[in-house]
Image (tube, rainbow, N blue to C red):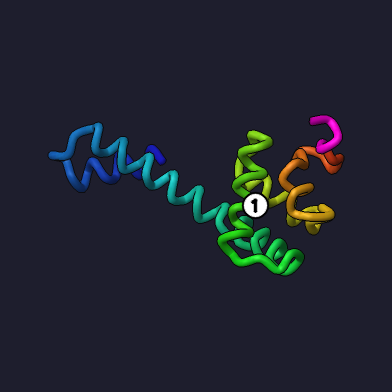
Amino acid sequence: MIECASEFQSLYPDESTGTTDRLVTENENLRRKLQTLPVIEQAKGILMGRYGVRADDAFEMLRRWSQDTNTKLHLVAQTVISHQCRAEDPETLSRRDPASTRDTSAET
């Protein structure tokens, strides 16, 4: 991204370094989102098909699981895809640790 910043500065020499840094950071964040979005959408589709829920509800399941396990959302989504969502029900899914396949509900 350094190339992007220097290219921007060469095109807009009057802009401050802070503006350049902000734009480079925004660009990096958008690129990261574009990389992870298909994984999240695929996981939502799996949850929608398995549990018959709407897209918003499937995303809420992923979000809750992510927060409950302190795991990045795209990693939770990848786990759902990898395991084809073997959870017995949505509540069990929310208590699973995406780093493993074991059910942690009995430990709480």
Relative to residue 41, is residue 32 drawn left or right? left
Relative to residue 88, is residue 70 drawn left or right? left
- Main SS type for the magenta part? helix
Q: Residue at x 76, y 38 (%)?
A: 97
- Return the residue nearer the eye: 40 or 31: 40
- Return the residue nearer the eye: 36 or 17: 36
Image coords of residue 45 (percent x, y): 67, 66
Check disc 1 and report the residue beneath it: 61
Image coords of residue 87 (percent x, y): 82, 52
Q: Please report the bounds of the magenta region as a residue range.
A: 104-108
Whether the magenta-drawn stretch holds residue 95 is answered as: no
Q: Residue at x 71, y 69 (%)?
A: 52
Residue reaching furthest to the left: 14
Q: Secondary structure at mark 1?
A: helix
Relative to residue 15, is residue 65 drawn left or right? right
Q: Quadrant of the N terminus?
A: top left
